[in-house]
Amino acid sequence: MRPSPPASRLRPPPPAAWPIAALLVGYPVWWALGFGGLSIIVVAFPMAVVLWRRRPIAVPKGMGLWALLVAGYLVSALMLGQTPPGTYGDLGTGRVMGYLMRLALYLALLVMVLYLGNLTEQELPQLALVRMLGVLFVVTVAGGLLGVVAPRFEFTSPVEMLLPGWISGNSFVRNLIHPTAAQVQHVLGHASPRPEAPFEWANAWGGNISVLLIWFAVGWWTYGGPARRVLCVAITALAAIPIVYSLNRGLWIGLAVSVAYALVRARRRTGLVAGAALAAAAAVFLAGPLTAIVAQRIDSPHSNRIRAFTVTSTLEAAAHSPIIGYGNTRNAYGNYQTITTGKTDWCAECGHPPLGSDGQLWLLLITQGFTGALLYVAFFAGAVRRFWRDRTPIGQAGTLVMILVLLYMFVYDGLVTALSLYLISFALLWRNGRADFPPAFSTESSQVALAAVSGAGEGGR
């Protein structure tokens, strides 16, 4: 029988918890204003004020690794002016701005984790935080559907209007401040929309929706009444449409891993129920029209050559500064097709692939060397080890997110929005294990719920 959380857990959070509510529930507003993923930097200031007023500050195990990661990034600034072999470009405003932006994000994420962990259960109930993530999942599904039906939708944000052209015209900055519904790419040999709203690019949408789906399952199914559960199933079914149209193989693999994890963690008595749910979801998917799109994407692996080129070039460049990296990305000469740099009339595909653009692991290698990459892996792998024995819904969901982080670092950049979701999940795990928190919600039926809703997501795959 599903337990009902105490009524106090469902009340709006007190003022101290409003910065995180503004970040998650108010994210569509941030996106429309042009802040998007950079909104974490804005809300980090009131979070820091809350922390300052309640010293001494509790710090979770493993956070020292993140502090070392940030410290290492400070040291990597010494290499901003260097040009590794096989790359080109001089030290300029763009490179410095990119470095400062990443530094601000790393610091803001550190503040956010400490802020969440130092709020009491009364100030910010675990269930309230989980449901805030669930609200963002609903927004992400809506943004994905918008990208499918109106892929050309875009508008100029207020931030974009205020910034000078030499900043807003930068392609990386423009992705962050210019709201668009989708990226239209020729992945299948013809123009195909890949949803990205309300995030910065299509791959960010793919990685983020898989993480948010996990928390949506916990908040809306495990601890939801009949009406909320019906909505949970309906919204998850709708999510299958943009999940397939995203043409995002990393997302599909992540959903498969989530399903496998749910089955492994399910107890014997719930295994048959979970298996039946997954079989039903798979049957619906195989009989549906979306299967053809997945098949076309699998048969069109042209991006593999691009990734192979940038990863190889990144490793070669990182080998020349293996300890502290180069502080920021670099542009490689040519691409996987030619040594020509830049587009030409006869080679429209030629360009300047930024090294470290194909996954957080490769970004860390070029910006912070092998040391930074090792610290990142140790931080999240350590979280999996410490929290694996937490059998509560939040414990199992959070551990799954930590596993996905280690998977996605090969294919997705963590910056900008993804790392915020990863570290909020880490904070939920930390809060769940603190002795001053009440016993976490724990029922066998919750394991069925996680497996069943993961199965619905697998149906979209």
Image: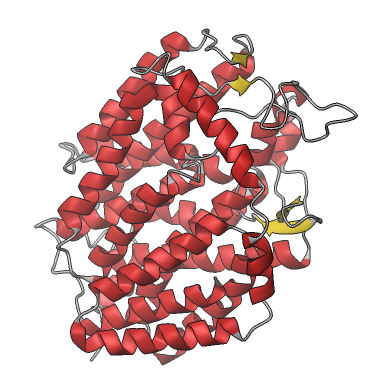
Q: Is residue 131 visible?
A: no
Residue at 33% over, 51% down: 16
Residue at 59% over, 9% down: 91
In which quadrant will I find the C terminus?
bottom right
x, y percent for residue 449:
34, 81
285 in relation to 354, above or below: below
Q: Nearer the viewer, residue 302 or 19?
A: 302
In the rendered view, how is the structure colored?
secondary structure
334 in relation to 321, above or below: below
Q: Is residue 238 visible?
A: yes
Occupied quadrant, residue 442? bottom left
Q: Is residue 271 left or right of residue 303?
A: left
245 in relation to 309, above or below: below
Q: Nearer the viewer, residue 338 or 111?
A: 338
x, y percent for residue 108:
40, 36
Q: Nearer the viewer, residue 447 or 351?
A: 351
Residue lying farthest to the left in this orientation = 435
Q: Is residue 248 left or right of residue 439?
A: right
146 in relation to 63, above or below: below
